[in-house]
Every structure is written in structure tokens, then in C-alpha cells.
Image (cartoon, helix red, strand yellow):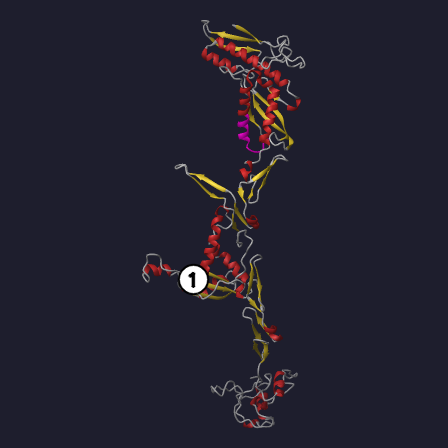
Amino acid sequence: MVVEIPTSCWSSADAAGSYNATDDQSWRHPRVVSCDFGGYHATHFLYLLLDDGGLRFVDAVMEPPDIPHVDLISSALESQDLLGLVESVTRRAASYAKRWEEFQTLPARYEAVWQPTSSGLTIVASVGGADALTGTPLPEVNISVSLDVPHAWPWPAEGELRPASIRVLAADDIPYHRREAVASLSAELATDATLAGGDNQGGLAKILLGLEKKLAAYAFRCANDCAVGNGACDTSQFPPVCRCFPGHGNLDCSHVSCPNDCSGRGACDSQQICERDVETGEIDCVGGTGKCACEYPFFGADCSLQPCAKRYLVKEGVDVSRGEASFAEEYEANGWQVTEVRLSPTNGDAPPPGSIPGDAFSLAAAAKGVAYVVFGSSDDATAARAADPFYADATPSRGVATRAREFAEELRALEQRERHLLSLFGEAQVECTGHGACDYGAGLCYCANRYFGAACEFTYCPQDCAGHGACDFVTGQCLCETNYMPDAFEGCMLRPLYLASTTCEDAAMDKRVDAFGVRVLPLYLSCMLGVALGSSATGEHCPEANAITGDKGECYTIFPLSAAIDAESAESAESSADATGSADSNATTTTTTP
């Protein structure tokens, strides 16, 4: 069986008297293809294959197959509604004839792409110019839009009274809120189709013109609407940009700004994160505090501060039975110089709540040893502190944005704990070793006079030891040369020789010897025994004797000769008494200095 299905067209004669004579296109029907359009087939043939009894058709073929029809035939085969099939094919042929006319007559700027047997249509829409509400100038941009033109368009769908509406499938060039934009645009087009009634909104070109105006509202919509009040949307460029108000940041101004952006030294807790409990439905939100979690070693509201170097550390929970030497060796194994170790068998904590003071439970709770270690330099102490769990693990929130609200409290707890442990040793928590002031902005010590080093841990010696010794910068004491002794003001001063005269002292200080190792300037025995030249020395000479305590101090009872003289020379020197009457002395040994 063959069924011929014609497609009617509309001519200017059909519209006689019902169109605007000044508009040569106004005669065209909004839903019926124009007779002067040659891009459609005026007749389609439906070939039906019937069963042997002639009561049921078992297949159908349409010629020419230029419109989608498989779905219509499949539905009819199931329902065996032959008249319904003919009616459906007639409606679709008429719809596609008109849509092809609308597609082909679209302005070239739309760059329309479509397939004759498909409901899809892709255009390039031009948006911009001026904001429809505010009149603000907008840059001109092109946006690719994919549309679904229903099979029934421009007629109502089967069983419907209202015209079928075009749907927006995609608008990938819209920068933000794309899904919402696609759904909203489709809804607006459906509303427009309903309100337009039978005139089909004036044709596809006018529908697309209205779509372009609607697109502008979404194409120039900022991300998250700048968090509704946290910023202003700048539409002078595309994509539009949020200009965040003070205190807010991020692409959509939804993040809370941290002070000074944490100075680039920490993580900012800028975004609130919410989780919904699937069982209770409760929503728990954390974050968005605008606080910084600073990286080591920085601190402060904006992470702009840093502590000054220290020379010590405290370590709790240790086994004090190991002894001080064991702790010193532990750190010195890492190349760190240790100058002092002190141990405490208890951490000094109060007994736990509910315990009885003195019982086994309270004693065990407090029996946690503490070590106090002082290093030779602040560099060694800084390295040791960074590796020690007491300092390294005490602030787990460091650098973790979601835990920034805990950072300040953790840092205060660490400082308080260190002060408590230091008090066990009678020490205070001081910056710059107590010898200077800390500039927390730079993390540098400004040392008082006589002190230097990163933590002011070193001490200059007085007068640089006056050129007669080496300075121990750790203690600030001079290691003086022979015949010199440390002095708080001079550094190294000449040690009193308690000789009989300045002539004797000059001779004692002159250590020149000749080629034979004999003094160039001889030192007389009388100088050592405290008697005048030519006088006899019959007893010991104790120049440092204390009359009050009776302490003699150091006494001279020996003869001075050059150390280079051998025993034989010494014996000869003893036998050749000088003019002092040395034969009366009780000296038994020779030396040249007290």
C-alpha cells in the first residue's frame, strides 16, 4: 500500500489583504512554508507492507527520507494506528519544511549549522553593547549556542495547544553559572512561546534576537555574583571580574581575607567548608575565620613576626638516670656543641584531679624527667630545637589553613609549657640570652655592649685582652699569657712578681738568651729572696703573706737560673755565690719565675 502525503505551502495570494504592503515579506506565514521556498519536498510517499491477511501492516518506508520518521513508524507499528501515522508524518513534513525555510533565511552573522534530519541547531550569538537594565557599556563578544528545535516546531506538539518551544542545550562560552544559564534560558524561551500565541514570536530570527539579549545577562554575570555583597562585578571586560571589597578575596569574593595575606608566610583560613551529616541532615561548617596558620618559625596575626634565637632547649619525659653526660653526647653526635646539661626528675606538674598527694598515682604522673640543655651557639640551639618533638610537634596547625583558628592557642600553650619547665631550673624564658632586645619584625637581636652573636650569646673580653692573651667568647674571660693574669678592666694585666725592685722585675721579664741558652740579662738571687743587693738571705721570703689569716701564700726559697743550664751548670752556679751572700740561704732548687 502506498499513501501520498502532500505538504501545503503559503503564497502571497493566500495572504491577500492581511499583510503590510510596505513590507514585502510580511505575507509569509509564521508556521506554513512559503511556496517560493524551494528547499523542501511538496509530496512524500509512505509505502506500507501488510500481513497476509491484509489487516495489519508490518513495516513502512517513507520516500524521500528527508525528515526524521523512524520514531513515528515504530510507534504506529506498535499501535497499528495507520491514520495516526499518516497524520503524524503530515504534521512533521509541514514542520520541517517551515523550519528549513527559517534556517536558510537566518542572517549570515549567526553562522547557523544544522542537519536536515536533526532537531539540532548551532548558532554564534553576538552579545554586548549595553546592559539592558543599567545601560552600562558592555564589550561585544560572540557566544556559541547549541539549540534543540523540537520536531513539532513551529507548530504545537501533538496533543498540545501551546506552541512548541526551543530549548538551549549548551552555551559553553558563558564563563560562570553555565548550567543555571542553560536551564533559565530554556524556561524563558518557553514562556515567550506561550505568551506569543499563534504568531510564533515573529519567526526564528526574532526568537534568536531575543535570545541574544537574554544571553547578555548570563555572559556578563560574575562568578557567584561576587558572593552577593562582597564585591562589585566589573563588566567592562570579558569574562567579567569581581572587584572584591576590603576584607574579601578570591575569584568570587567568597573568601575572607587574612591580615596582610599572612605576609606570604602562612596559610589563610579564608573559606568556610560545610559538611552535611547523611543520617541527621545537620550541616556542620568550619573555617572562614580569616586567621593565619603561620609557617615555622613565624607567628603573629599576619605571620610578620619571628622569634629571636635562643641558646637553650628543654626536653621533658626523659630518663634522667642516663646522666648529664649521656644527654650531652646525644646532641654532640649531631655536631652541636653543648656547654651545660641539667636534669630534673620531675616535671613539676600538679597531681591529677582526684589523686591523693603523695600516693603512687600522683607520684607516677609527676615522675617525668626534664632536661635543660645549653649550647655553645644559638645556631646549634636553633637546629636542635627544630628537631626536638617538644618544639616541632607542639603546633600541628602550622601551615594548615583549616586549623588556623587553633594556631594561636597552640603557640601560647607551647610558650607557657616552656616557661614552666624552665622554672624547674631557676631559669627564665628570655630572648637574646638576656643580653639584648629582640626585633620581632626581623627576628634579630640588638645586643648590649660587650655582647654579640645571633642570640647575643658571646661576650667580648675587656680591651681584647690588651694583646697579652686569647679571649674565650663563651665566658668573656681572657686566657692570659705567662706573667699576665685576667683583669675585669684591662683584660690581661702584668702579674705581680713581688720582686725586690723594678730593676729586678725588668730583668725577670727579659727572657732573652744567648747562643748557649744563658740569660742575656742575669737575674740576681737577691731579687728572688727580697733582700737588697749584697745582703745575706738566711730565710724564706713570702711577699704574699696575710698578717690577718696567717696564710703565707707563695714563698721564694729557691735560686733563679736559666732553664737551659744543665745540672752541671746549675751546680756550678750554686757554688759561685754572688754578692748577696747566697751561702747563707736555704735554697735547694733553681727557677726564674714565682
Does the magenta segment cover residue 449?
no
Residue 265 visible in the displayed image: yes
State the SS at label 1.
strand
Name the residue tied to disc 1: 370
Query: What span is in magenta?
Result: 173-185
Q: Residue furthest top?
A: 53
The residue drawn where x is 48% and y is 51% is 407
Residue located at (55% from left, 28% from top): 182
Q: Amino acid at mark 1?
A: Val
The majority secondary structure of the magenta stretch comes to helix
Q: Is residue 150 above or below residue 329?
A: above
Specify the quadrant of the image occupied by residue 131.
Answer: top right
Q: Nearer the viewer, residue 89 or 525?
A: 89
Q: Position of residue 308 (x, y in %)?
A: 54, 60
Q: Nearer the viewer, residue 578 or 573?
A: 578
Q: Please indicate, yes or no, whether residue 389 appears anywhere in the rendered image.
A: no
Image position, residue 424 (x, y; %): 43, 64
